[in-house]
Amino acid sequence: MALPLGMISALVLFLVALTGVQLSNCQHLNAKISCFDCPHNYDFSGIQVAVKCEKVKKLATATTEENGSFKVQLPSGISNTNCLAKLLGGPNQLYSKKKNLVSKVVKVGHQPNTYTLATPLAFSTSCPLASIDVKSCGAQKGIGSSKTVDLPLPPEWGLAPSSYYVPFFPIIGIP
């Protein structure tokens, strides 16, 4: 009851052929990010983009390539996508306005299962408001002085300088 050698080889050949076939039922988001003040040959690689779809718990992330393009596989079975893409950050500090950080995912009309962004995700490498308002770019003012109060104590008392124990106020209470 052994199978003939021809049937076994045909079965193996059929299985090998099936592994090479890739049915494209996946939905993909293909898009690019842009930069306002970058030089022409700026390397966009390493910038993270997240995509979140409605009614889907899992967050899809992608890393951009050198030219700023990225590709994300969207969850299957979503006919009317309500997805948003967000620029997360990269290896260097990025600055952007809120309207340029998030974009709606829209379907490309002529290609099935292919999506793109409604508005481009864009950023700057330097603070665009640096001359107007330093706080808006995350720069903090310097930390206040760490000077302590030093009350003059008579040296004959033999006490350490008051700066060692004046900031400490012990709580003395009756238990």
Image (spheres, helix red, strand yellow):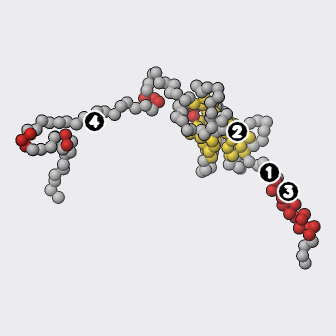
Query: Is residue 85 visible in the rendered structure shown here?
Result: no
Mark whose residue sits in front, 2 or 3: 3
Q: Judge the density around disc 4: few (<14), some (14-19), many (≥20) Cα neighbours within 10 Å.
A: few
Q: Which is nearer the N-term, disc 4 or disc 3?
A: 3
The earlier-in-sequence mark between 2 and 1 is 1
**Residue closest to the far bottom:** 1
Which residue was labeled with disc 1?
Answer: 23
Residue type marked 4: Ser
Q: Is residue 115 left or right of residue 54?
A: right
Tell me whether circle 4 and circle 2 mark residues in contact (CB < 8 Å).
no
Q: Are marks 2 and 1 in contact (CB under 8 Å)?
A: no
Residue drawn where x is 45% and y is 22% of the image: 132
Residue 146 bears which disc, if any?
A: 4
Give the crowd class for mark 1: few <14, some 14-19, many >=20 residues within 10 Å.
Answer: few
Q: Nearer the viewer, residue 104 or 61?
A: 61
* Residue located beneath label 3 in the image: 17
Q: Is residue 4 above or below residue 84?
A: below
The image shows residue 157 at horizontal and vertical percentages of 7, 43
User: Foreground mark, 4 or 3?
Assistant: 4
Question: For the residue marked with disc 1, what is the amino acid?
Answer: Leu
Q: Secondary structure at mark 3?
A: helix
Find residue 91 and report its horizontal and vertical position in percent.
55, 38
Which of the marked residues, 3 or 1, is nearer the chain's N terminus?
A: 3
Local SS, label 1: loop
| Residue at mark 1 to residue at mark 4: CA–CA distance | 66 Å
Which residue bears the numbered disc 2? 30
- The type of residue carrying mark 2 is Asn
Q: How far apart are the two marked residues, 3 and 1, measured between alpha carbons? A: 13 Å
